[in-house]
Image (cartoon, helix red, strand yellow):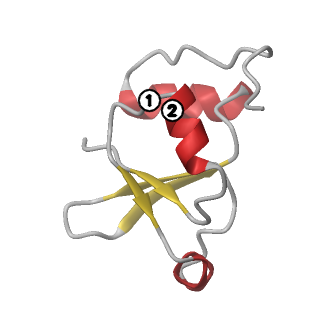
Amino acid sequence: YKFVAVSTTGYRLDKYEAQYPSPFPIVRLDPATGHRDKLTGTPQTLILDQAGRVEQVWEGAFVGNRQKEIEEFFGARLPGLRADEVLE
């Protein structure tokens, strides 16, 4: 899989990137494009097949059952979220 992060607003993205460098590219969408394509919730994880069709969608943070589903899909263990990691 290739991972790409998508920002639908860019709000405080530079500060976030400085604090939490991304290991993959971050694409900034115009808010109108995100709304048109129904990319309005954050975080939202989409899996696209090789033809670019949506195969799977998860909305929200990777916690609880959602985290388990994502781990099973990718065959990987996610580190989880730390309660003390808050962007100021």
Do labels 2 and 1 touch, CB within 8 Å? yes
Q: Nearer the viewer, mark 2 or mark 1?
A: 2
Quick check: 2 left or right of 75? left
Quick check: 51 left or right of 85? left
Quick check: 78 left or right of 2? right
| Disc 2 from disc 1: Cα separation | 6 Å
Tell me residue 33's x, y (percent): 52, 82
In this view, the residue farthest toward the left is 50
Which residue is drawn at the image coordinates 49% and 25% (left, top)? 71
Tell me residue 82's x, y (percent): 72, 14
What's under tag 1, amino acid-wise? Pro
Identify the residue position indicated by label 1 in the image: 21
Where is 54 relative to 78, above or below? below
Instruction: Identify the element where label 2 is drawn.
Output: helix
Which residue is drawn at the image coordinates 54% and 46% (left, top)? 14
Question: In which quadrant of the rendered image does the C terminus lie?
Answer: top right
Disc 2 packing (10 Å; few <14; some 14–19; many ≥20): few
Tell me residue 30's x, y (percent): 52, 77
